[in-house]
Image (tube, grey):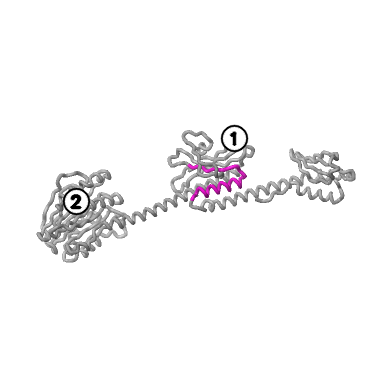
Amino acid sequence: MAERTSPDERLRRVLDDFSLAGLRYRLVLMDGASETILHDGLGAVEAETPEEVWPVAEDLTFRVAFAESSQPAAAKLQKLLASHAPETLRMERELQFYSQELAGRYGEVDLLTSVGDTLSTGIVLERGVTKLLAELVDVMDASGAELWTVNDDESHLARFAASNPAAGAATIDLKLSRSPLAEAYRGQVARSAAAEDRAEIMVPVRRSPGHGLGGSMGVLRVWRGPDRMFRQSDLRLVTAIASQIGAAFENRRLIGESVERERMMVELELAHDLQLALLPQLSDFADCADIAARCEPAESVGGDFYHLFRLGEGRLGVMLGDVSSHGYSAGLIMALTMSAASLVVQEGDRPGDVLRGIHRELVRKLESTEMYMTLCYVVLDPSRNRLRYANAGHPHAFRVGPDVADRLDALNPPLGIAEFDTYEERELSWYPGKDVLLLFTDGLSETIREDQLWSDDIIIEVVRKHLKDEAGTLLEELFTIASPGQAPLVDDRTALVVK
């Protein structure tokens, strides 16, 4: 803050020249109700020397007293004061006024330029706002300042920060209160109010409209004593500070959303890895058959899955399922199904019994999520050259041989639609090394040819062409012809090949 200059300083310097000339006098400036001794050259003995009153301008009067030896110079001094004092004092007062204005503007500019740093000095926004309010009070020479913010349902205002740390917590019920602060928030316009003990201005703090929120998030209030009203320039300054506070809150919200998105991405990536880890390791079944499988979720997690089971007498259980949706909810159903299947298969390995047991375990969860699931379970028995299966609504299941291509028809509706006491089974021949068991989901077939409703014929031709190839080669060829290119997947894609 710039040092204030006394309004009579220049006049004092002029009067000093008269003192050097040997004049002894006392001169008092009366400016309204205030008095200022400009010069006192009389001693204590002459303190009671009679005074004269010289009016020199509106609201300006001099009282002067001369020592006897200086009486002849009284007229000369009076003429000097009458001709120069009013203009000199006016100039000094204007200089003081503009100096104070410049000092005030400098403080405002300095506050506005540093507000960004102030609000971002720490992780806790409340500390930055509290510091800013204290600086605002200092620059405006105010008595106090507060920031009030609205809660999520916009029913209450709460004091968020105050220039006075001892202000404590407080709330205002927006539905009941008719206070100027509540009216300023509801009207979303700046208001001024005057009471017996204070004059105050209240400015809404608005959210950034650029992110679709808009509206007011609170009110910034500043107050002074009742005898010092606020000017328009004060309102502009508080409005500018309110805008900066709104931007700081918006930045904090965006940073929070960014952190939350990053956390969700990490969690989804972890969920993706965990889901794929639930799928069986094909190498564990290498002694049972030539097996290849691939699962590609459309999102981080999906509802497609496959499962393999070692059964007695050299038999192999092969399961593939497709939950009606994809994403996190479908992934949960998928994980529950695999867990339930592992338990049910231990109780009995007949395909129909396994499907009934899985449905019994999952029916409540499927109903609550309004999902259903197609599921095909096949038991391969190489020693007897047969396969036995149960199919709950899954359309893409085939046994392909040199001369045959049989669809493993759906014998019951998908799980979650209706509950049955028994699930039907069917038996077909199975010759290891010649026949291929192919199970896949519609996410694979739908990406082969968009202009063709059914693409199963194309898939069967590919299988027949590669009957003598290893299961992994055949699977790779299927995903090659079904590649969506640069387009994102719209559904999970899963296929399982057993030879």
Amino acid tagged 1: Ala
Q: Which residues are magenta?
A: 124-149
Disc 2 target residue: 344
Please state the total of marks drawn on the protein image: 2
Q: Taking 211 as reference, is 147 left or right? A: right
Amino acid tagged 2: Val
Callout 1 crowding tier (Cα within 10 Å): few <14, some 14–19, many ≥20: few
- Write the residue at 61% across / 45% down: 140
Quadrant assignment for the C terminus: bottom left
Front in this rendered view, residue 359 or 467: 359
Disc 1 target residue: 195
- Write the residue at 36% across / 55% down: 265
Q: Main secondary structure of the magenta part?
A: helix
Pinpoint residue 361: horizontal percent, then vertical percent: 22, 47
Pinpoint residue 105: horizontal percent, then vertical percent: 62, 49
Label 2: state its secondary structure.
Answer: helix
Label 1: state its secondary structure.
Answer: loop
Pinpoint residue 280: horizontal percent, then vertical percent: 23, 58
Q: Taking 55 as reference, is 465 left or right? A: left
Residue 432, compared with residue 52, is above or below; it is below
